[in-house]
Amino acid sequence: MTDEFREIRELREKFMRAVYDLRDPNAGLAMGRQIKERMGLDPADFGDDDDLYMDIAQYFDQLDYIRRRSDGYGMVSITALGIQYVEGDLQRRDAPGSVTFNVQNAYGSIFGTQQHAEMNNVSFDFTTVEAELDRAQAQEEHQALQAALWRQG
């Protein structure tokens, strides 16, 4: 991990800890200037430090850990999910989960995120379909099966 990513990760942790520690017990609000100080950022800096603060706040707002407020500079409120995150009662999610499947040869493969699957390998030939056609009672069913058979042939 590069130093830049490590620094951002540490600032994110400091941000959430500061929001948790500084929140007003009644309103749940924390002030941006105090949070910036706790993060080691300059609260009077409205340039790079402010941009970094706002990016981190937006990141946690998107994860639903905080709510950004428009009624004061950098004011945020922590959500129940954010409290669980800080207290360690929640699996930390750095990014929305996604799964990528790279397939070379799919024969006999199981796709998905499940751990167990059941597969029944039944041999298939057109003789089986023709026998099923003979057993079909209703004319419509018989015609539908025949049409499917002809499309395959």
Image (cartoon, grey):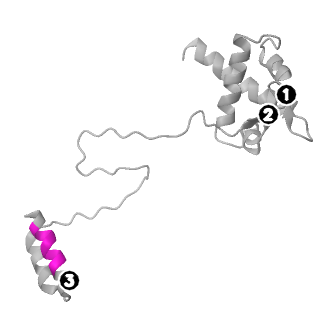
Q: Looking at the picture, does residue 109 appear above or below residue 61? A: below
Q: Secondary structure at mark 1?
A: loop
Q: Mark 3: which amino acid? A: Glu
Q: Mark 2: which amino acid? A: Arg
Residue that carries the numbered disc 3 in the rendered image:
140
Residue at image location 59% in from the left, 12% down from the top: 3
Q: Of the numbered discs in the image, which one, if any, rests on residue 69?
A: 2
Residue range highlighted in magenta: 143-150
Residue at image location 75% in from the left, 25% down from the top: 15
Q: Is residue 132 magenta?
A: no
Q: Could you say where residue 8 lies in the image, as x and y percent from the top left?
A: 64, 19
Dot 3 surroundings within 10 Å: few (below 14), some, or many (20 or more)?
few
Q: Mark 1: which amino acid? A: Gly
Q: Could you say where residue 59 lies in the image, as x and y percent from the top left?
A: 65, 30
The residues tagged by marks 1 and 3 sit, at their Cα atoms, a distance apart of 70 Å
The residues tagged by marks 2 and 1 sit, at their Cα atoms, a distance apart of 7 Å
Residue that carries the numbered disc 1 in the rendered image:
72
Q: Is residue 145 magenta?
A: yes
Picture quarter containing residue 128? bottom left
C-beta proximity under 8 Å, tags 2 and 1:
yes
Q: Could you say where residue 134 lies in the image, as x and y percent from the top left?
A: 11, 84
Q: Of the numbered discs in the image, which one, if any, rests on residue 144?
A: none
